[in-house]
Amino acid sequence: MSGSGLVLVVLLAALAAAVPLLVRRVAVLLARQADLEGRAAAGEALAERMRTVEARLEQGIEAEEERDRLFNLSIDMLAVGGFDGFLEQVNPAWVRVLGWSRDDLMGRPLLDFVHPEDRPAAAAVFRRLADGEPVDGLECRFGCRDGTHRWLSWNSFPYAGRQRIFSVVRDITASKRAEQLLLENQERLRALSNQLSLVEDRERRQLAEAIHDGLAQQLFGLRAQVTLLKYPDKLADPRAVVEQVIAVLDETMTQARSLTFELFPPVLYEVGLAGALEWLGRQFEQRTGIACEVDTEDTEPDLPEDLRMMAYQSARELLNNVRKHAGARSAAIRLRAEAGLVHLTVRDDGQGFDPEGTEAIVPHPATGGFGLFSLRERLRSVGGALTVSARPGQGCRVDLTFPAPPAAD
């Protein structure tokens, strides 16, 4: 055998011995590769599941953060409480509205904060909540840190499974105050309506008395005098009887004119408000003996009839108050117009009074106080105002101000 053949034989023998080993190694490598691929696939699946869980956690965190934002930024007062009557969680609106800290609010039974007069009703509602019944619109006063109370409206929903009560609470103090003001104004209007009826009855009575005691008596005297003229031959001096009749007629005409002025002063429409006020001052001085000065401008405001009558009646009512209550020696009326406003002032040097509370007074027939109240309401109806300046022993001054309508072109 040649040398090259021997080498080939040796190589074939070595190759035959190495093949099984190579096969086993290849099989091991293939198995390892399959295992690695399987692990990689499992790892990828686990990573995908982890990414899904992470996304869900992120969504949950975002939802929780959104819930917290709504809870903390809500204008309404939000709360979670237990069936034991304690608050367990409150949002910042509670602190802003009531002044208490969260620890203060959650450290005491809820009923401790409720106004004593409202506790029975609130306790009954809390019992209904504990029985699983939702409550809508409970209104009660809740104590603030500064000692005041605010009205709160509660909408509460029990969650029996967790022994919790979820509440949405709204501060309704402003609406309650508006409601109270409306009730007070309604009471004032009822009182004013009753007073107007009383005033009408009083004026009708005064008119009847004036006619009966004045005009009727004068007319009865005239009839008696005229009857005598039927028998001139029995009269010593018929001419004297005629003169007496004329004198009684003159007096009757004067009384009729005065009564007419009292009821419906023609001068108010013939010469204006200033002239009517001057006449009113003279009549007041003659009837009462109280000196009355009237100060008006040469050029008075051009007012419609309703405003002229209101101003005249207001001055007359104030002078009547001076006569009945002031014990004054003198009074004065002043009329001015400037900057689109009419200013009417009536003052006296009488005993005065304490004007505190006249803005809020609700008149009652038994206590009086109708004059200023009626004037104030009349002025408010035309956009005006009434102010009172008075001190005990130092007289009184009442200022009426109302807008004058612009002059027609």
Image (spheres, rainbow, N blue to C red):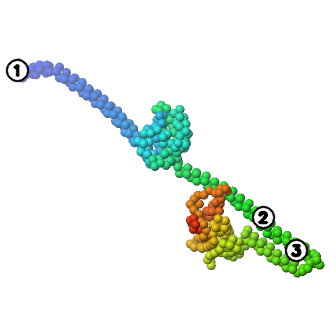
Label 1 residue SS: loop
**Earlier residue among tags 1 and 3:** 1
**Earlier residue among tags 1 and 2:** 1
Task: Identify the residue position indicated by label 2 in the image.
Answer: 208
Tell us which disc is closer to us: 1 or 3: 3
358 to the left or right of 233: left
Mark 1 neighbour density, 10 Å: few (under 14) some (14–19) many (20 or more): few
Residue 299: image x %, image y %?
Answer: 62, 77
Label 3 residue SS: helix
Residue 2 got which mark? 1
Q: Quadrant of the N terminus?
A: top left
Q: Is residue 277 at least partly visible in the picture? A: no
Q: Who is closer to the viewer here, 289 or 59?
A: 289
Q: Who is closer to the viewer here, 161 or 53?
A: 161
Please state which amino acid type lies under the numbered disc 3. Gln
Task: Identify the residue position indicated by label 3 in the image.
Answer: 225
User: What residue do we see at 71% from left, 58% from top?
Assistant: 197
Q: Who is closer to the viewer here, 158 or 315?
A: 315
Q: Quadrant of the C terminus?
A: bottom right
135 to the left or right of 319: left
Which quadrant of the structure image shows residue 390? bottom right
186 to the left or right of 116: right
User: What residue do we see at 85% from left, 70% from top?
Assistant: 220
Mark 2 neighbour density, 10 Å: few (under 14) some (14–19) many (20 or more): few
Residue 37: image x %, image y %?
Answer: 27, 29
Are the residues flagged by discs 1 and 3 in contact, CB closer than 8 Å? no
Label 2 residue SS: helix
Q: Is residue 295 above or below residue 133?
A: below
